[in-house]
Image (spheres, grey):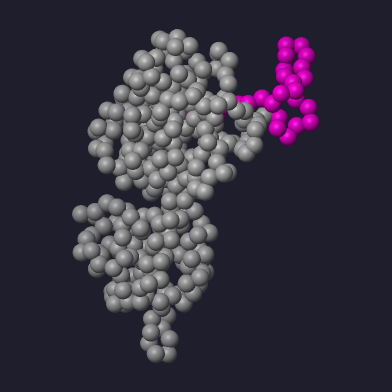
């Protein structure tokens, strides 16, 4: 959860816009503008250790990349000022809401950001191409001012579709009269920015792509491991615990909900008495069964029942018997 206040983060976003507008009048040859590719380091023992390399650009492309970043950030600022989109701290639940957001998150809260620190040091990286193996995981446009004092880094998810004609037998360039054969691959840069870093803060324009770039799935899986281990240690039995685990790890949306369960932490103190109380006093979707000795267990008919089970372990009831709070099911807001 973000620690910066919304007002401070919003002012900081305006400072990012001002920085990008200020460098617009500076010759791009005096700026540090790099197009960087990130690939997984296959020699590293860590799961998400990246190598960064630089694409060699001709003199026209840096200005195009700078304009791309500035245009997308200015567009978001304009949409915020006209209340067409919302400004919010980052939250996994925002992904499933019927609203458009600019979200903010201090980089200290991003699980894998330590692997990106080299991008902030201003160093020059060795050259590469898009077609070299292994495939890029993502790309970044790094913009530094003339004094190398300020920096913005735009992150864009990578797709093989950017290499145009990759699976074609023949490639042609359209001319005014004739089509001309092209031997080299054509590379396209997406007309978007998925997230952008500036001075310790990440601004998120596309949550799904942001989470993919920064490997949030790995963090969700780690939290799921913790929750499942703790639930297995409780005295609340399952009719088929393996089905429950398969339902969790087999669905990324379920993994995101597990992250919320982990953050809230109510499951850590639940026991069989709590389960019996909830079953007897609330209209819960969780299915329970009893054996011949009257012992109760949680039953899942199929993997779709995992949603009800996780709501149960997240104490999602309008009147919580476990925390003495009133709140809206599947929401972090108090119901009042």
Depth check: 79 or 143 in front? Answer: 143
Left or right of residue 325: residue 291: right
Name the residue nearer the viewer: 325 or 143. 143
- The quarter of the displayed image where residue 258 is located: bottom left
Q: Of 258 and 42, which appears nearest the observer?
A: 42
Does the magenta segment cover residue 187?
yes
Q: Tell me, yes or no, whether the highlighted magenta stretch contains residue 87.
A: no
Could you tell me residue 312's position as x and y percent?
A: 36, 66
Whether 155 is drawn above or below 225: the answer is: above
- Residue 158 in view in this figure: yes
The percent position of residue 213, horizontal first and vertical second, equals 48, 40
Report the predominant secondary structure element of the magenta stretch. loop
Instruction: Please name the residue shown 49% across and 30% down the image.
Output: 140
Residue 98, compared with residue 148, is above or below; it is below
The span picked out in magenta is 165-193
Residue 169 in percent (x, y) is at 79, 31
Residue at the image point whose x is 50% and y is 15% from the top: 63
């Amino acid at each position: 959860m973000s620690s910066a206040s919304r007002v401070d983060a919003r002012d900081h976003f305006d400072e990012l816009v001002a920085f990008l507008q200020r460098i617009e009048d500076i010759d791009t040859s005096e700026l540090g503008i790099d197009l960087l590719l990130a690939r997984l380091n296959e020699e590293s023992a860590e799961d998400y250790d990246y190598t960064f390399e630089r694409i060699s650009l001709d003199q026209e492309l840096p200005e195009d990349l700078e304009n791309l970043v500035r245009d997308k950030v200015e567009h978001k600022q304009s949409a915020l000022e006209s209340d067409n989109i919302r400004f919010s701290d980052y939250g996994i639940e925002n992904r499933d809401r019927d609203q458009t957001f600019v979200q903010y998150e201090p980089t200290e809260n991003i699980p894998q950001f330590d692997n990106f620190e080299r991008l902030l040091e201003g160093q020059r990286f060795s050259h590469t191409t898009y077609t070299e193996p292994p495939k890029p995981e993502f790309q970044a446009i790094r913009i530094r001012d003339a004094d190398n004092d300020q920096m913005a880094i735009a992150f864009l998810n990578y797709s093989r579709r950017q290499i145009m004609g990759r699976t074609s037998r023949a490639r042609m360039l359209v001319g005014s009269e004739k089509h001309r054969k092209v031997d080299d691959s054509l590379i396209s840069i997406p007309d978007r920015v998925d997230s952008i870093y500036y001075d310790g803060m990440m601004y998120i324009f596309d949550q799904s792509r942001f989470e993919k770039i920064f490997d949030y799935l790995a963090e969700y899986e780690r939290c799921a491991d913790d929750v499942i281990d703790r639930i297995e240690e409780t005295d609340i039995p399952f009719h088929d615990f393996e089905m429950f685990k398969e339902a969790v790890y087999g669905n990324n949306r379920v993994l995101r909900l597990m992250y919320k369960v982990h953050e809230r932490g109510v499951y850590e103190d639940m026991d069989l008495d709590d389960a019996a109380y909830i079953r007897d006093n609330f209209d819960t979707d969780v299915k329970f069964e009893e054996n011949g000795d009257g012992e109760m267990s949680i039953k899942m008919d199929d993997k779709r029942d995992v949603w009800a089970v996780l709501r149960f372990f997240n104490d999602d009831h309008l009147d919580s018997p476990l925390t003495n709070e009133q709140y809206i099911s599947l929401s972090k807001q108090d119901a009042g």
